[in-house]
Amino acid sequence: MRPAATPAAPPCDPWASLRPSDADGPAVARIRQRGYLTAGVDLNSYLWGSADPATGEIVGFDIDLVRAIAKGILGPEARIKFVTMSPEQRVARIRAGDVDVMARTMTITCERKAEVAFSTVYFQSGQQLLVAKNSPVTAFDRGLRGQRVCVGAGTTAVDLLARADLGALVDVADNHLDCLVRLQSGLTDAILTHGSLAAGLAAQDPMIHVVGPRLDETLYGVAMNPNDTDLVRRVNAILADYREGGPDSPWMRSYDRWLAGNLPAAERPAAPPAAKYAD
């Protein structure tokens, strides 16, 4: 008799993270001893992380979150070292200990959860297609056959485009801002990226727009080294406070400042994503 097959392991739950705790541990102690938080960010994402041209200050939705994390660990005068990198460098840099936290519109996937730890979900988005307003492309369908679609290296858009098998020509750039430059220069025909990032690109160029609905669900989490479990729990505790307060919560105030006026009405959340804990 052939032995029964071993049941496949259940897929991970991208929503679930460690239960929050304010208890100090080695990772939190390391940050306090150093005197500043190192945070991986993207400074090429308008509305999410970029330098204010008037002041030079680093601002955006992800930056507000990083500042809240730093203050939750180090107090109101917290210092932060911002570290920029491309999407494909994120996992390696986290695992190498180059940063304490990564807040870079990073999608939680089961593959990534096998390599890094994530906080609870702090934002929901989905892949969307961005084209010039005079483009013949109107949807993510067979109309993309032969069209060049730009995606950021190391992003989930790469896999989505490959799975769709629409006959598009894959154009890989370092990041979505490079894709915007290529689209504006006529070197590519469309950009596939998160709708939340596409909104920032469209806000920078009135001659481009998003077409079609979300193509999937993407969940953003703060990524950390899997050995830093005390830091994951502390970040989740900070996030719990960050969500509290309804329309007056720090999350909603940041959302209203950076995103509310640039996302389509159908994309606007009524509240922050609810936290889910694995233990």
Image: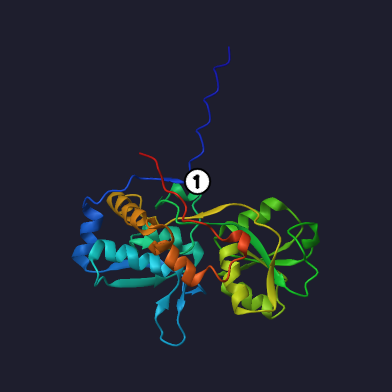
Q: Position of residue 78 (x, y in %)?
A: 26, 70
Q: Residue at x 49, y 62 (%)?
A: 105
Between 105 and 147, the one lying in front of the other is 105
Task: Please state the horizontal and vertical placement of residue 155, each as a whole percent of the image.
Answer: 56, 60
Q: Residue at x 56, y 71 (%)?
A: 261
Up the image or down, 98 lies above or below 16; here it is: below
**Residue type highlighted by circle 1:** Cys
231 vs 192, left or right, is: left
Circle 1 is placed at which residue position? 110
Q: Where in the figure is residue 196, as x and y percent of width and height?
A: 56, 64
Residue in view at x 44 percent, y 63 percent: 252
Q: Which residue is at a point 51% across and 49% down the rendered structure image?
A: 109
The answer to whether residue 33 is left or right of residue 140 is left
Which residue lies most toward the top here? Answer: 1
Does the rendering let one see residue 51? yes
Q: Is residue 28 left or right of residue 43?
A: left
For the C terminus, the quadrant is: top left
**Are there few (<14), some (14-19), or many (20+) residues within 10 Å of tag 1?**
few
The quadrant of the rendering that contains the N terminus is: top right
Total numbered badges shown on the rendered structure: 1
Give 39 or 194, whichever is nearer the viewer.
194
Residue 276: percent from the left, percent from the top? 42, 44
Residue lying furthest bottom: 54
**SS assignment at label 1:** helix
In the rendered view, how is the structure colored? rainbow
Q: Furthest-left residue in view? A: 33
Is residue 48 among the parts visible in the rendering? no
Instruction: Return the residue nearer the eye: 275 or 110.
Output: 275
